[in-house]
Amino acid sequence: MRKLALSDEILLKLDKPARYIGNEVNSVLKNKNEVKIRVAMCFPDVYEIGMSHLGIQILYGMLNSYDDVWCERVYSPWVDLDKVLRQEKIPLFALESQEPIRDFDFLGFTLQYEMCYPNILQVLDLSGITYKASERKEDEPLVIGGGPCVYNPEPIADFFDLFYLGEGEKRYRDLLDCYLANKESGGTRIDFLIKAAQIPGIYVPRFYQTEYHPDGTIKSMLPTLLNIPEQVKKEIVTDFKAAYYPLKPIVPFIKITQDRVVLEIQRGCIRGCRFCQAGQVYRPVRERELNDLKHYAMEMLKNTGHEEISLSSLSSSDYSHLGKLIDFLSDELKEQKINISLPSLRIDASSLRIMEKVQDLRKSSLTFAPEAGSQRLRDVINKGLDEEAILEGSRLAFMGGHNKVKLYFMLGLPSETDEDILAIGELANKIAAEYYETVPKSNRNGRVQINVSTSFFIPKAFTPFQWAAQAGRDEFLDKAYLTRKGISAQLNQKSIKYSWHEADTSILECVMARGDRRLSASILAAYENGALFDAWSDFYNHDTWLSAFAETDIDIDFYTTRKREDDEIFPWDFIDCGISKEYLLREWKKAQAEEVSPHCRTACQGCGMNQFITNL
């Protein structure tokens, strides 16, 4: 019988102690003496966030399907337990076995957003694992990272032994077999890393050296050993039929952010929005078969007891069999009163007709993401959405019983003008007017509520906007003020509420998203000075980061507001994600010319992803 790492006395003092006891429904317990490899899979944020992530569930189930592997979980301990672990000198532990992370073979991080970087160091620190990979001893776990942030891993490269580029179902077995073979032959840590670096999709930072120009831009980045590839190519799943999917996802004891069954219906996106990293790097689009999804849905609901199922993808409307899947789920789940949620729907009549079949239609507000207020700027970002479609979608929603609409926009997009910003309020006003014009007074359920939210544009790697300059802090705040002023001038202003994201965190995220390896020292300095849970506004302290950048001689503007030349070498150019730099530059030029590119099913834009399509 396993023993909890924390005493009852400690657990009773913690906020939500169920975060740390494990043993949830469908969690996997194995005999450590009967496996050859132990993996601790970490989401570097609080339990409720990490437990909501589908990628962790997939890797957890897949790795545990191997008889010789035991994969356990660990999350960033909340600040109350962080303090206790330090005071009591208790090492950070895995949920399943309750044993120290330092005793594992691998510590894997899924890296979903840049603001979690200090939490990586927290996990290493509390586990007693050396921060820098180059200084780790033979008996320390191998630290591996995966997820969207590894499409520019350089700011955190010093802390990782290796990174996995692409989709985890493809190469993890090869990597583990390489580790076992090296272990059985008596090989060292370095021996394994040299062999791992030759596996497709695996990047080992210590074997690459970057040279810089006097102005701080990159001159070259090349491998330091023979047989190490100059470019690391991402790995993708081309056969979903054979790929693992978790039919018994873990069911937590406490409420989490996404407390429902998640059914991934497809990967990739056809749309080509120029600001969206996910839409670019997760190409090409691959759909799951309808019959498989029907089976997965019913099995997961049976195995979890959840009362809601969410259909997950970057653009659910583009799934070819969405209508048939909704019909099936609606018929099967009607008596069980299980809700169906449809995130990532586009604003069009066909999507809204599908939504009418969803049981919780009247319970939730409708979310639209126009991203920009004016048609000119929507063309610049290649949103593929016009005002009439937005208004028609709103009209149909109001006729279907909605009176709440959420609108998401970005401020600071390339070429944005004051007129584009003021158009946000004008569009919100037109949507409010649609409600009053469409719904008879006798049928209205109170005043329409339009919630406008703006975030600040962050240029990301492998997007056409990777060349774009980010706005400065004061400029961002001026844009938010102008947005609020524009909304206040509207006839229906009382029906419109406005909120905006913090400018400081957006700037820091940009630094990390486009940074190079020199930032590792800054992240370590910030963590040692108290940075932690920076994704949570209550904990973020911008002065801590300013001090860290000053201490490590980093110029923030170099990574944010500086203009990039067309031929500049980026820190992520050593990665082959399938999309050519020539295509991205071509799209950047088209954005500046306000030209729209059709989506993938209309006309191929020659992005380079055909190399994967031939294998589908």
Image (tube, rainbow, N blue to C red):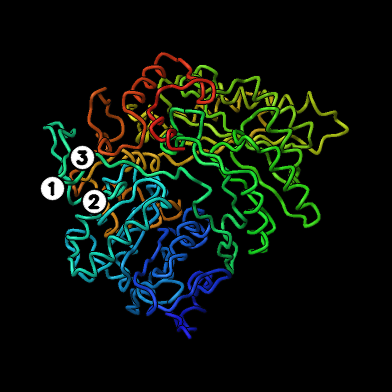
Query: Residue 377's spot in the image, x, y percent?
Result: 49, 20
Question: Label 1 to label 2, Cα distance in Å?
Answer: 10 Å
- Indicate the quadrant where residue 154 lies: top left
- Residue at image location 41% in from the left, 30% down from the top: 610
Q: Amino acid at mark 3?
A: Glu
Q: Earlier in the sequence, mark 2 or mark 3?
A: 2
Q: In the displayed structure, does residue 201 sit left or right of residue 251?
A: left
Image mark for residue 225:
1
Furthest-bottom residue in this view: 1
Residue 497 appears in the picture as rendered: no
Q: In the displayed structure, does residue 581 sit left or right of residue 596?
A: left
Above or below — where is 552 with respect to 493?
below
Above or below — where is 469 with respect to 84?
above
Q: Name the foreground residue: 333 vs 444.
A: 333
Residue 283 appears in the picture as rendered: yes
Q: Dot 1, crowdedness within 10 Å: few (<14), some or many (≥20)?
A: few
**Residue behind mark 3:** 230
Q: Amino acid at mark 1?
A: Leu
Q: Earlier in the sequence, mark 3 or mark 1?
A: 1
Helix, strand or loop under label 1: loop
Question: Label 2 to label 3, Cα distance in Å?
Answer: 11 Å
Above or below — where is 396 with respect to 27?
above
Helix, strand or loop under label 2: loop
Q: Name the foreground residue: 438 vs 40.
A: 40
Asked if the residues shown at circle 1 and circle 2 are in contact, with their CB atoms under 8 angstroms apart, the answer is yes
**Residue behind mark 2:** 197
- Residue at image location 27% in from the left, 46% down from the top: 155
- Residue at image location 70% in from the left, 24% down from the top: 392
